[in-house]
Image (cartoon, helix red, strand yellow):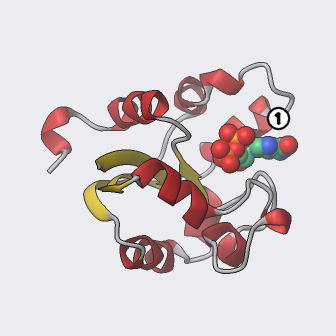
Amino acid sequence: MSQRTFSIIKPDAMRKGHTGAILADIEKAGFRIVAIKKLSISKPQAEGFYYVHKERPFFDSLTTFMSSGPIVALVLEKDNAIGDLRKLMGATNPANAEEGTIRKRYAGSIEENAIHGSDAAETAQFEIGFFFAGHELV
Ligand code: GDP
């Protein structure tokens, strides 16, 4: 069944010039781009986005990183979009990511790992609404 998920090309991948390549990988994997924008987020906005991780030891570092430069926010659609994007991304730590995954190709570390993808339907709904208004989903 067709499903939507939310993704971010993270600041590390943008700084290294991998934005176009990652978008191409996403499209080649069969995702339709429903919405796309380049923007920068503040540290408080990053804290709001990642609030589920607020007790984790890496929360301060993660939100500093995510507000350190431009990102690309995306809404993506395909059958099984949430699971298929997680597969295409690869493991959180690029050292454990499978060949051919985005994190294996472009990520530098467990934190600076190139891409975000929603982990469940409820999370996708929250994350899409965090970045996009309904009229931007086309
Ligand atoms: P994801 O769903 O694969 O993105 O991983 P998580 O939801 O567990 O973590 C969210 C993000 O926090 C990851 O994508 C990383 O950028 C960062 N992160 C996760 N684990 C660690 C860690 O152990 N150390 C640091 N510094 N960052 C981490």
Local secondary structure at mark 1: loop
Residue 92 point in image, percent of width and height: 74, 53
Q: What residue type is disc 1 on?
A: Phe
Residue 94 point in image, percent of width and height: 78, 65
Which image quarter: residue 93?
Answer: bottom right
Observer-nearest residue: 32 or 3?
Answer: 3
Q: Is residue 34 left or right of residue 8?
A: left
Residue at far front of view: 1
**Which quadrant contains ligand 1?**
top right
- Residue 91 appearing in the image: yes
**At 71% from the left edge and 68% from the top edge, which residue is drawn?**
107
Vertical position of residue 58 compared to residue 75: above or below: above
Residue 117 point in image, percent of width and height: 53, 49
Residue 87 point in image, percent of width and height: 59, 61
Which image quarter: residue 33?
Answer: bottom left
Which residue does the numbered mark 1 point to in the structure image? 58
Mark 1 C-beta to ligand 1 under 8 Å: yes
Observer-nearest residue: 69 or 20?
Answer: 20
Q: Categorize mark 1 by other alpha carbons within 10 Å: few (<14), some (14-19), many (20+).
A: few
**At 61% from the left edge and 30% from the top edge, which residue is drawn?**
50
Q: Is residue 94 left or right of residue 45?
A: right
Vertical position of residue 38 compared to residue 15: above or below: above
